[in-house]
């Protein structure tokens, strides 16, 4: 089974514990697929996701929207300690950039 317009976020990494490649899908964190080579791991996880999506459609369960299809505003709220906020404000003032620009640069590293 194969999904049409499969826009899900896949990743293949090495599993030292299993001594195989593992295929993962960000939108379905409980799913994985082990294989001897990375191509087979990707093919396997994509097949499992397609099967799960098919089952979810049959049972009327909500299907996760692919991350790639979501819209992002570029804003999110992060809570930090007052001390960290103060240190960042000082660093911002000392470097002559806005607090927003300073934090954005630190997060994107």
Image (spheres, helix red, strand yellow):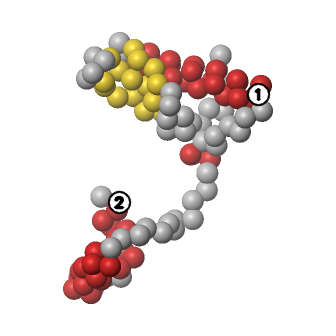
Residue 18 drawn at (x, y percent): 31, 18
- Mark 1 sits on what residue? 59
| Image position of 28 with respect to 72: above or below | above
Circle 2: is it few (<14), some (14-19), or many (20+) Cα within 10 Å? few
- Label 2: state its secondary structure: loop
> In the orientation shown, which residue stands out farthest toward the top?
36
Residue at coordinates 77% horizontally, 25% vertically from top-left? 58
Which quadrant is home to the N terminus? top right
Query: Quarter-wise, where is residue 57 in the image?
Result: top right
Which quadrant is home to the C terminus? bottom left
Residue 4: in sight, yes or no? no
| Image position of 94 with respect to 24: above or below | below
| Image position of 83 with respect to 46: above or below | below
| Image position of 12 with respect to 66: above or below | above
Residue at coordinates 77% horizontally, 33% vertically from top-left? 60
Query: Quarter-wise, where is residue 4 in the image?
Result: top right
């Amino acid at each position: 089974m194969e999904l049409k317009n499969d826009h899900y976020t896949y990743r293949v990494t090495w599993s030292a514990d299993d001594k195989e490649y593992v295929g993962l899908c960000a939108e379905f964190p409980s799913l994985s697929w082990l294989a001897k080579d990375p191509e087979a791991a990707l093919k396997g996880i994509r097949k499992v996701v397609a099967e799960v999506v098919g089952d979810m459609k049959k049972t009327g369960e909500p299907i996760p929207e692919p991350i790639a299809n979501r819209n992002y505003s570029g804003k999110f709220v992060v809570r930090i300690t007052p001390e960290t906020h103060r240190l960042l404000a000082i660093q911002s003032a000392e470097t002559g950039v806005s607090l927003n620009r300073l934090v954005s640069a630190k997060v994107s590293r």
